[in-house]
Image (cartoon, helix red, strand yellow):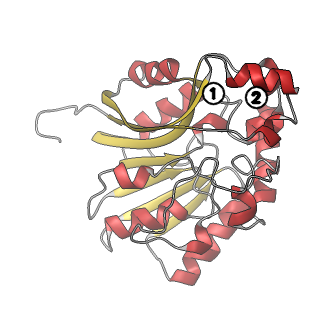
Amino acid sequence: MSTNQQLKEFVKQKYSEIATQDKAGNQASCCGSGCCSTEVYNIMSDDYSSLEGYNPDADLGLGCGLPTQFAQIKPGNIVIDLGSGAGNDCFIARKEVGETGKVIGIDFTPAMIDKARMNADKLGFNNVEFRQGDIEHMPVAAGVADVVVSNCVLNLVPDKAAVIKEIYRVLKPGGHFSISDIVLEGALPAKIQQAAEMYAGCVSGAIQKSVYLLLIEQSGFKAISVQKEKVIYVPDDILSGYLSPEEINQFRNGSTGIYSVTVYAEKPCCEPGCC
């Protein structure tokens, strides 16, 4: 399709555009990819509005789960949010960590960082920080975080193994992560797999669920579990941009499944009692 760097630049461009859109516009597309659907409903995202700390200005409707709901965040924790966007998960996490904790959001896109900082300033939050950076090489020291969260971001990253290794590095011994992401069971049609627009839309960058979980295990994580799983249905009017009616029918009746999963795992303790 493209080199890893070209993919990263494409994603950065698309998410810079998304930063200027409202939630309704993003939810009517495939994870904000711009392939707009007339079937206006949440293709990927879950409803955050009932969670404490929720701020509608920070919710661009780009997620595919509610990782902060499952992340077991405690008062005083240091939390890192990967692909923090306009700050939605960071502000939910801030409610959980309280005044004694800290939340660090990392995002690849300068426009998203600017929007998140503006939202934090408007809310008067002093313990939420946003850093621009590539999550394959996080701008964070080793062993800093108690918890790492992320919402529909790793599927956008070409080198997922590098990100998972980075998560391991920045977590404290005994720390854990809760990450929502898009995974596959079965092979996507080649035309979708090769479409950069769908890559920015979180679908064609997804990998097999079994491979995803294996990468986590191979990075040294323990107590790996799937906290939540749901089927992702991509409307026909989005698929029609890439597939013929016959190919759409074959896709619908085939064995391929697109899923949102929320995965939990722990970094082992290095010494007795560290947990």
Q: How many numbered discs? A: 2
Residue in view at x 84 percent, y 21 percent: 246
Report how far apart the C-alphas of labels 1 and 2 lie in the structure.
8 Å
CB under 8 Å between discs 1 and 2: yes
Q: Report x, y in % for residue 116.
A: 62, 68
Q: Nearer the viewer, residue 138 or 227?
A: 227
Hey, what amino acid is under mark 2? Asn
Q: Tell me which label, 1 or 2, sits earlier in the chain.
A: 2
Q: Nearer the viewer, residue 259 or 68?
A: 259
Query: Which element carries disc 1, helix, strand or loop?
Result: loop
Residue 153 seen in render: yes
Q: Is residue 95 left or right of residue 273?
A: right
Query: Which element carries disc 2, helix, strand or loop?
Result: helix
Q: Looking at the picture, does residue 154 appear above or below residue 55?
A: above
Q: Is residue 203 left or right of residue 223?
A: right
Q: On residue 173, which mark appears?
A: none
Mark 1 crowd level (few <14, some 14–19, many ≥20, 10 Å Cα): few
Q: On residue 159, which mark appears?
A: 1
Q: Which residue is mark 2?
A: 4
Q: Is residue 190 left or right of residue 216?
A: right
- The image quadrant of residue 135 is top right
